[in-house]
Image (cartoon, rainbow, N blue to C red):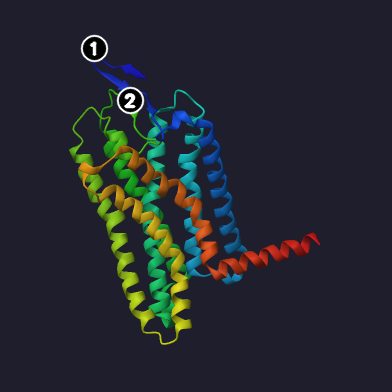
Amino acid sequence: MEVILGENETSVTEFSLIGLPNQQKMPVLLFVLFFIIYTSTLLGNSLIIMIIRVDPRLHTPMYFFLSNLSFLDMCYSTSIVPKMLANFLSEERTISFPECITQMYIANSLGGTECFLLAIMSFDRYVAICNPLRYTIIMNKKVCIEIAAGSWICGFLDSLVHTIFLLQLPFCGPNIINHFLCEVPAVLNLACADTFINKIVIFACAIVVVLIPFLLILISYVHIISTVLKIRSAEGRHKAFSTCASHLVVVTFSYGTIIFMYMRPRSSHSQDQDKMATLIYSVITPFLNPMIYSLRNQEVKGALRKAAGRQKGIHN
């Protein structure tokens, strides 16, 4: 839809989302599939947060950051999936301009926050394994709260920069977004003005939000692996590596798809491939995270068994 501003000037008031590849062929099946994924994401991450909160053994920095990640994943999915579900059963698949900007801002904020949180979690493992005697001093409660809050603030500030620059652009048509959500590059393609400055801003922010945290993760794990390999006992090495395994799997999922999207040559870009990559890190990864951390982490599994046993005792 467009509103006439002048004799030959119009302004877009809503966008039309094309959605996923082949979405029109099986909308009901996709609705059911993503409804199950979404509800499982909410339940799984809620369970992780609850277990960490009620079990005193999990009141450590590592699980404090994990509870932040679980809450973030719930918010991330909620910013994207409900609108997807509505569009699966709708022929128009429209989203108003304010709703589009809001979705873009929130989703981008949470994506940036996740990059910072994953870097902090790797630093936490670095301190725990490489400086165990100073761990409780370095990663005290105040520091953990401050750096976690800093991650959220930086993520939302980064998205605010993108949003402010994008809102300076005119949108006079077309209004069709070849995506299943309002994402910065997809919306930017519809602007009726030169977007060179916006692309420079995206590149600069990507260095701060994606590349620098990724390099910090790599540096942390280089030191971690170097330290673990010096441990003489195989059991000690296994125990040290096991505390990092879940985090490494999540990092691989998250950064693997982000690097696939932004680091490959522009000539090889496919819109459908970009959609699938976005789907993995924004919808599938939040769904898988609770399973990754519960299946790979002995302490979380122990807390789950303890909670299940307590519930069984209450019912008996």
Q: Name the residue under label 2.
A: 175
Residue type highlighted by circle 2 = Asn
Q: What element carries label 1?
A: loop
Q: Residue at x 56, y 37 (%)?
A: 32
How many numbered marks does the figure carry? Answer: 2
Residue 134 seen in render: yes
Is residue 158 found left or right of 107 in the rendered image?
Answer: left
Q: Residues within 10 Å of mark 2 (few under 14, many from 20)?
A: many
- Does residue 55 appear anywhere in the picture? no
| Element marked by disc 2 | loop
- What residue lies at 31% left-to-right and 65% top-to-bottom? 216
Residue at screen point 25% across, 17% down: 9
At a point 29% along the width and 44% down the height, the residue shown is 161
Query: Of circles 1 and 2, which is in front?
Result: 2
Tell me if residue 208 comes above or below residue 35 in the rendering.
below
Could you tell me residue 198's position as x and y percent?
23, 40
Q: Is 246 positioned to the left or the right of 316 in the image?
A: left
Q: Mark 1 points at which residue?
A: 7
- Which amino acid type is marked by label 1? Glu
Which residue extends farthest right?
A: 316
Please tell me which residue lies in front, 311 or 2: 311
Q: In which quarter of the image is residue 164?
A: top left
Image coordinates for residue 79, horizontal then vertical, percent:
46, 41
Horizontal side of residue 53 vs 276, given as left or right: right
Where residue 236 appears, as percent x and y from the top left, is: 46, 82
Looking at the image, the residue that sits furthest to the top is: 7
| Circle nearer the N terminus (1, 2) | 1
Please give the label number shown on residue 68: none
